[in-house]
């Protein structure tokens, strides 16, 4: 059986540990309430074969590598017509029957973009399970007052409950990455909406963390906090971004909006 050669430019590290593959798939199945499953970058199908065992009818794979597409088409006949030779980041989620779940051993060079793609489509995508570089996984689950806590932490946790499931060593991949990996599960909170102006929320969070060493009074200078009594009275202006919870940022956004 001719195998696919991992391509550095695509960030491919093929998982070859079957037990870990089963655990990743089970982490999705444990919470699965979806009509469509999208697997991102299946490569040679180490996750695909376990997803097909129970959910062949609803599985779609998005694979940008033409060599992998040829391999998958040959080895997984059940996938006929459901292999998309496309960039996941460019997919139009309106073409899929909701709700949609996303799973994959994500290429580390675009894993953050994959998370934001899911957040962008959160109204139809309530669940994601994926393999990340360990440092990225730690940022996803980070708590306030830690160095890992940042823009990704706040925006992800505002919409999803994030679980760090388990750590994965370098040796279970071909080629082995130079870093450890981790599997994370995202489950959407309620319907995926915030109790504030969401576009303003994003602007506030990004402005706050772009100058994370400064107090919010300085980091949020573009919003003229000194002219907003409610902001000054809130107590937030003496804090730094990393001290605020997701809910604090919602409250702060509503103060700004008013």
Image: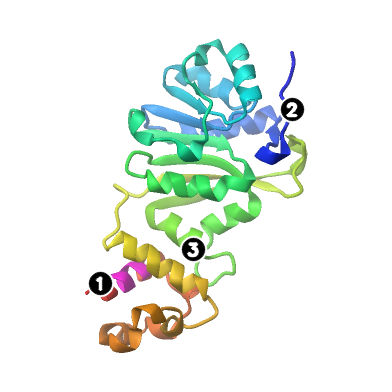
The residue to which callout 2 is attached is 5
User: Where in the figure is residue 93, as x and y percent of width and height?
Assistant: 38, 35
- Residue 207 vs residue 201: left or right? right
Magenta highlight: main SS: helix
Query: Visible in this render: residue 118?
Result: yes
The residue to which callout 3 is attached is 151
Residue drawn at x 36%, y 45% is 122
- Cα gap from disc 2 to disc 1, whole angstroms: 52 Å
Q: Is the C terminus in the top left, top right, bottom left or bottom right quadrant?
A: bottom left
Dot 3 alpha-carbon crowd within 10 angstroms: few under 14, some 14 to 19, many 20 or more:
many
Which of the 4 image quarters holds residue 155? bottom left
Query: Visible in this render: residue 166?
Result: no
Mark 3 element type: helix
The residue to which callout 1 is attached is 257
Dot 2 alpha-carbon crowd within 10 angstroms: few under 14, some 14 to 19, many 20 or more:
some
Residue drawn at x 40%, y 82% is 221
Give the magenta part as a residue range.
249-254
Residues marked 1 and 3 touching at CB (< 8 Å): no
Asked if residue 166 is positioned above or below residue 72 in the image, the reply reads: below
């Amino acid at each position: 059986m001719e195998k696919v050669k991992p391509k550095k430019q695509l960030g491919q590290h093929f998982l070859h540990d079957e037990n870990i593959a089963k655990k990743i798939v089970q982490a999705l199945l444990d919470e699965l309430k979806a009509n469509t499953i999208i697997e991102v970058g299946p490569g040679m199908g180490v996750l695909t074969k376990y997803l097909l065992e129970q959910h062949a009818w609803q599985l779609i794979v998005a694979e940008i590598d033409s060599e992998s597409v040829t391999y998958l088409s040959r080895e997984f006949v059940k996938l006929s017509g459901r292999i998309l030779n496309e960039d996941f980041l460019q997919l139009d989620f309106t073409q899929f029957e909701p709700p949609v779940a996303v799973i994959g051993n994500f290429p580390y060079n675009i894993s953050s973009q994959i998370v934001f793609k899911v957040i962008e489509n959160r109204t139809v995508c309530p669940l994601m399970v994926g393999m990340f570089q360990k440092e990225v996984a730690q940022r996803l689950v980070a708590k306030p007052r830690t160095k890992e806590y940042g823009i990704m932490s706040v925006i992800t946790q505002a919409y999803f409950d994030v679980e760090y499931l388990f750590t994965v060593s370098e040796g279970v991949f071909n080629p082995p990455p130079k870093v450890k990996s981790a599997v994370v599960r995202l489950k959407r909170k309620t319907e995926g909406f915030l109790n504030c102006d969401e576009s303003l929320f994003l602007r506030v969070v990004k402005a706050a963390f772009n100058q994370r060493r400064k107090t919010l009074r300085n980091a949020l200078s573009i919003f003229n906090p000194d002219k907003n009594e409610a902001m000054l009275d809130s107590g937030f202006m003496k804090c730094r971004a990393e001290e605020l919870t997701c809910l604090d940022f919602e409250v702060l956004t509503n103060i700004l909006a008013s």
